[in-house]
Image: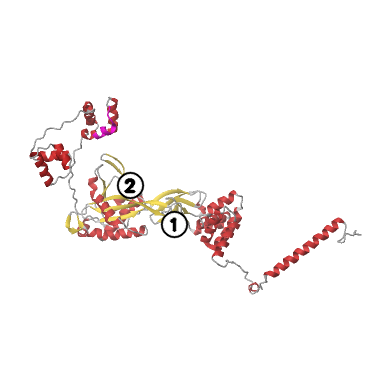
Amino acid sequence: MPVISRELEAEILRLHHAEGWRVGTIARQLQVHYSAVRRVLTQAGIVLAPQRTRPSKLDAYVPFIQDTFTRYPTLRASRLYRMVRERGYAGGPDHFRHLMARYRPRLAAEAYLRLRTLAGEQGQIDWAHFGKFVVGRARRPLMAFVMVLSYSRHLFVRFYLSATMASFLDGHVQAFTYFNAVPRTLLYDNLRSAVLERVHDAIRFHPTLLELAAWYHFQPRPVAVARGNEKGRVERSIRFVRERFFAARRFADMADLNAQALAWCAGEAAERPCPEDRTRSVRACFQEEQPRLLALPSEPFPCQEHVMVRAGKTPYVRFDLNDYSIPHTHVRRSLELLATLDTVRIVDGADVIAVHARSFDRGAQIEDAAHIQALVDHKRAGRAHRAIDRLHHAAPSAARFFKLAAERGVHLGSLTRGLIDLLDTHGAAGLEAALTAALAEDAAHLGAVRHFIDLQRAQRAARPPVAVTLPEDPRVRALTVRPHKLTDYEQLARESTDERSDDACDDDALERGHDGNDEPVT
């Protein structure tokens, strides 16, 4: 509804009373909508003639439309348009959709009570999505676990790279440790991690959540369906985190982000005025609330994730998009994997056979050198596999180079040994540059790689790396080799060529039965 100034209202009334202008004339001359002019005149007590409206194509169908909306108040205008078209309506769909706003029943506005809680009685929990976070080749969802105490509005936030059950449990444990206490009731949205099934008031909680509740002695309670106002405190806290903490925030990694979030919760977030009593800070209200919270148990809840994995032919098991090495003696078995947010343990029965740092990358191989070395020692064929794997990790272009070499019938074993030697002497960067240059020239053989490595070395004016391994015999190590001039080697080459030429002439003469003077040989 347009806002009309006092001066414009006075001008509208003057033109109507003094000049006798009609509503349409006033609207055109003052460049305001005619409905605004009619409103000003009506509020001044002036009775205006009702507006004459032209008959509409829809008039005959209005009773049918009203009856349909009475039975189906949420029916879409596009479906209703097809229904009246079948009954003879000849108007267009856009104008029909515009007119439906007049006849669709309006829902009555619902009023909500302001909910208040006692100190220490309730906490609210929810997940919030904060975009994507790149870890190596993986783009993980950046999720924030948010818990807020309903009385004091003291806030805890921690970021994770997933919203799995393991992250959900760890968020609870970290929040309880931060508050050094537990609320008596925790209010959840209808999350899959909290509520498995719900039919009206019949609720089936997640059994792991019930184990957590029994450990910390709190009562889990989901909000009613379509009642977001019941968890408005955590919703406003998430918006507060987005605007006051995360916006334009710079961080190096997840550890840095969570360290900044924890400092912010204990600093700026705790010093803000409490919404229930703006004369006090959140920190002051929390100090009043904390004695009424439940005490922590002696040990935190174990948050590790249990997964059954299957080891194939290779000594690796896959978990969360990555491969973790195991001893080669445990291939082709079903194993149990215990994962936390920091470590991955692989168990066979009661024996822990591997422990790795957890990776959130994609397609990475997390290896224990002892596992691979044991396989190499056990099976010689593993050495070649390890050499190729080492080349692929050191020089990404090696995969395409090997593929092209295989298509052209190059001996892959000799090629692998030669590339490993070049990797040891010239490093990963030099080998990668040489492989890239060789592929650009469509030359998939070892000589091309050596050529480009020598070319790079010449451009840098560097001396060639020479790896010499001498025996332990002291006589060999004390031996001095005197270098000769290259002209001496050229002279030897010419003399050898002349001798071969003379021998060839003698052989020809013997075959003809003559000596060198064309005399018969007797």
Please tell me how crowded label 2 is: few (under 14), some (14-19), or many (20+) other residues with Cα within 10 Å.
Answer: some
Q: Position of residue 263 (x, y in %)?
A: 29, 61
Please tell me how crowded label 1 is: few (under 14), some (14-19), or many (20+) other residues with Cα within 10 Å.
Answer: some
Residue of label 2: 193
Q: Position of residue 373 (x, y in %)?
A: 53, 58
> Residue 499's quadrant in the figure?
bottom right
Highlighted magenta segment, given as a residue range: 90-98
Q: Nearer the viewer, residue 201 or 348?
A: 201
- Name the residue: 50% across, 48% down: 312
At label 2, which amino acid type do we have? Answer: Ser
| Residue 401 at least partly seen | yes
Magenta stretch: includes residue 282: no
Q: Quadrant of the N terminus?
A: top left
Residue of label 1: 355
At label 1, which amino acid type do we have? Answer: Val
Which callout, 2 or 1, points at the residue further toward the start of the chain? Answer: 2
Q: Nearer the viewer, residue 308 or 519?
A: 519
> Residue 40's quadrant in the figure?
top left
Q: Position of residue 340 (x, y in %)?
A: 38, 54
